[in-house]
Amino acid sequence: MAYHVIYAAPFFMDATLRFLSGATHLPDTHLTVVSQDPAEKIPAEIRARIAGHWRIQDGLDPVQLAEAAQHLTRQFGQPTAYLATLEQLQVPLALAREALGIPGLSSEASRNFRDKSTMKDVLRAAGLPCARHALIGSVEQARAFLDAVGLPVVVKPPDGAGGKATYRLETATDAQRWLQQHPLHPDRPTLFEEFIRGQEYSFDSV
């Protein structure tokens, strides 16, 4: 019996293709792919090991992800897994899985690590110490946080990934310059975090 596994990848970047290549070697598996990029962007040696492909307009849209899976299901049977490695894809993919009844990480759990403010709240509620933090949507809130916590602080998007748009503000001048260059808005708050020095550990699993 062969399992049907769907791999979602909006774009075929180098790191994505390495994961995809590994997935094509899963035993007893028909691997299909959903992407925003055309199948022709997959290297021929990898494409030859893929059972099917479905292209969508927006690779981060949970509705389109679910519709693509339905098309592939009609061709290859009910999927046992719907996977992706891109962090920004985890919440929309979880929503698509839930809509289709495919097992996997829930949308609630996905949001708990995608939203870094929520993640810290969850960890603190479980008894794990975290840096002091706040979602900041105005200059007044920013100044109140800086007065309470002190400098340096780290500022970043609450759903950021890979250190993108992340800054360490060391001095009052740094903070003033950042506030001038990055207008704050209550509808799109920025995560402010206490900066803590210490030993960093990482635990990854598949």
Image (cartoon, rainbow, N blue to C red):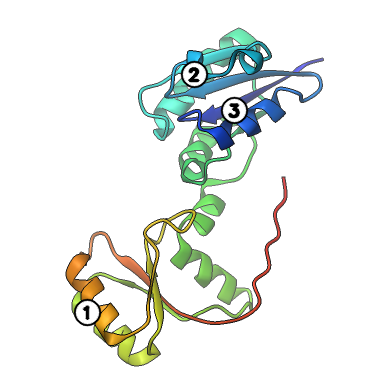
Tag shown at residue 41: 2
User: Which residue is found at the position 43% from the left and 22% from the top?
Assistant: 37
| CA distance separating discs 2 and 3 | 15 Å
Query: What amino acid does circle 3 point to?
Result: Tyr
Q: Is residue 183 visible?
A: no
Position of residue 11 relative to residue 43, above or below, is below
| CA distance separating discs 3 and 1 | 44 Å
Q: Can you identify the residue that label 3 sits on?
A: 7
Mark 2, residues whose alpha carbon is within 10 Å: few (<14), some, or many (≥20)? few
Q: Position of residue 39 (x, y in %)?
A: 50, 15
Query: What amino acid does circle 1 point to?
Result: Gln
Mark 3, residues whose alpha carbon is within 10 Å: few (<14), some, or many (≥20)? many
Mark 1, residues whose alpha carbon is within 10 Å: few (<14), some, or many (≥20)? few
Q: Position of residue 167 (x, y in %)?
A: 38, 68
Q: Which quadrant is the C terminus positioned in?
A: top right
Tag shown at residue 176: 1
Helix, strand or loop at mark 2 = helix
Q: Is residue 111 visible?
A: yes
User: Which residue is found at the position 55% from the left and 68% from the top?
Assistant: 122
